Image (cartoon, rainbow, N blue to C red):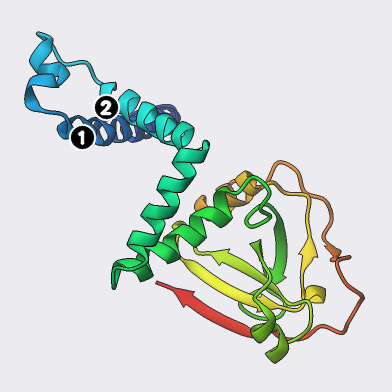
Amino acid sequence: MLKRYLVAGLLVWIPLAITFWVLDLIVSTMDQTLLLLPSSWRPDALLPFHIPGIGLLMSLLIVLATGMLAANIIGERLLRWWHGLLNRIPIVRSIYSSVKQISDTLLATRGQSFRKVVMIEFPQRGQWTLAFVVGSPGATIAAATTPNAITVYVPTAPNPTSGYVLVVRPDDVREVDISVDDALKFHISLGVVAPRTGARPQRSALTAQRPPAPVETISHLD
């Protein structure tokens, strides 16, 4: 009986404690942006007490102001000049261009990457997992594999930032009625948190039916 009460108490406090810990970590990290200000301008120097979260507010205002600047003609010209400058610096050019391509793909309002969840047989036939549709692998890879090939990303559990990039045949993909958030929760929770909605997997209707074929390409993201 005592053990049951202890477990019930832990189920209440552990999620709450972790939630507050993550929020405190975010606020504390964003407060470090105040170090960009001169010491005499910082709130701690002007006020007799510390107010947590001012750095977070400042970061949001900076991002908002940057977005407003980038949305007008002058801001677009400045951004083009800035991109051109970074693209002329060795090493920095490779890192910046790669990260920018990824962020543009993920944050684009019209982009389709990571907007759809599918099921594929992985790591072998008869074993299924949830994957995210990334898009097309490009003409070169498609020519070496199959027309209309699809690039999908399979995250590892419980860390979804590491995973596998797979190039698969369209017929090897099964569409499911699962949101991206629910699919991420499924992976992060090691399969404990089941998706709230889930239609019966169906063969993808993106292309004509073909016989199943093995996964063409597998690469691991460290």
Can residue 40 be seen in the rendering of this structure? yes
Q: Quadrant of the C terminus?
A: bottom left
Q: How many marks?
A: 2
| Image-based side of 47 in relation to 203, left or right | left
Q: Nearer the viewer, residue 72 or 8?
A: 72
Residue under label 1, please give it: 32
Query: Which residue sits at x=39%, y=54%?
Result: 81
Dot 1 lies on which element? helix
Q: Quadrant of the N terminus?
A: top left
Query: Which residue sits at x=49%, y=54%?
Result: 103
Which three-letter amino acid code belongs to the residue tagged 1?
A: Gln
Spot occupied by residue 175 in the image (x, y as percentages of width and height):
79, 60
Q: Nearer the viewer, residue 129 or 11?
A: 129
Sequence-first disc among 1 and 2 = 1
Q: Quadrant of residue 123?
A: bottom right
Residue under label 2, please give it: 55
Seen in the picture, residue 104 relative to 139 is either above or below; the reply is above
Which three-letter amino acid code belongs to the residue tagged 2?
A: Gly
